[in-house]
Amino acid sequence: MRAAIITEPGSLSVGDRPRPTPAPDGVVVRVGACGICGTDLHIADGEFPPSPYPLVPGHEFAGTVTAVGERALGDLRPGDRVAVDPSLFCGHCEYCRAGRGNLCADWGAIGDTVDGAFAEYVAVPAANCYRMPDSMSMREGALVEPLSCAVHGVRRIGVETGERFLLIGAGTMGLLLQQLLQSSGARVTMVDRNTRRLAISADLGAEHTATDVTELEGVGPADGFDAAVDVTGAPPAIEAAFMSLRRGGRLLVFGVADEDARISISPFRIYNDEITIVGSMAVLNSYGAAVDLMASGAIQTAPLLTDTLSLEKFPEALAMMRAGSGVKIQVVPQTSP
């Protein structure tokens, strides 16, 4: 089969790999669509320590079951259309036993630590598969993974009707978070340097948009926002989000910063203003909810699903992601049964 292969950091090609067979408790999925995210850039650049090389990346995907292992859980059959949770938790470390598998001591993920879905076929655990209704396209199915991350993030920060939220970063994740927050009754202000993405945010219902937090003076709430979410991972943006909060405010660090990045914030203000700071790491018991939300039509996907490329053009797709082109870029492999 054809697959995108990162042989080592900085070395990327599309070539042939053996077609996978299912593990006894797994299935093989013919990939219908697979999205590119920032983690894929980090893997390509050698900046994601868990990743081994060579590796086929790709963790945001949906497809059709083609083969089922003899001890696979559930009643999956060839022909079933599925969205796949890429999470690989060990199940027995202290974090897994405490119900916090996303913090697993031996954390892994399809496309991050084992071969993923920028390929014609991928082998996955049957337990990670969620059936998709016929009304859900493969492209929407591949968007379930980032949506599930957003669901977990909203659960971490919490939201009450009427709260004023600042979001920094209007990429796929920011626009998904915006829609989830608004559906819970929050009022959202979006900041991003990309004016095309800001226009999408406005169309999706943002109260205010700006290219810099400093532009919000006189527009945003005078006493600060109830909560802020950084979706960029950039230290200056995280600091700006922190400074935007009112007393008693909450900050969600959602974007992925470099491991050695540092921020400068006032510990006195955290104490004196009772500021709450939380993080959100990937997916945790949120995949089923994301599938249901996507199937219900609660998420507007058309403004987000901007580009599709063939598997052979994966290097071009990665370059588009790096350049900030479009919103969600997906690869649609040309497969045969």
Image (cartoon, rainbow, N blue to C red):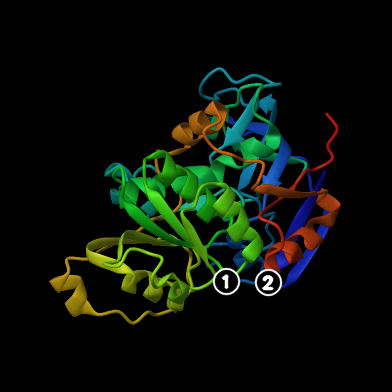
Q: Residues within 10 Å of mark 1 (few under 14, many from 20)?
A: some
Residue matched to label 2: 9
Residue in front for this viewpoint, 90 or 278: 278
- Cβ–Cβ below 8 Å for labels 1 and 2? yes
Q: Is residue 259 visible?
A: no
**Number of numbered discs overlaid on the protein picture:** 2
Residue 243, x across and y down, in percent: 32, 74
Mark 1 element type: loop
* Residue type marked 1: Glu
Classify residue 71 by image quadrant.
top right
Q: Quadrant of the C terminus?
A: top right
Q: Which residue is mark 1?
A: 47
The amino acid sitting under disc 2 is Pro
Residue positioned 66% across, 55% down in the render: 327
x and y, in percent, of residue 12 in the image: 77, 65
Q: Is residue 41 above or below residue 165?
A: below
| Location of residue 194 in the rendering, given as x and y in whole percent from the top left corner | 62, 67
Considering every residue shown, the one lying at the far left of the view is: 272
User: What residue lies at 50% left-to-right and 66% top-to-bottom?
Assistant: 232
Q: Name above or below for residue 144 compared with residue 228.
A: above
Horizontally, is 1 left or right of 133 in the view?
Answer: right
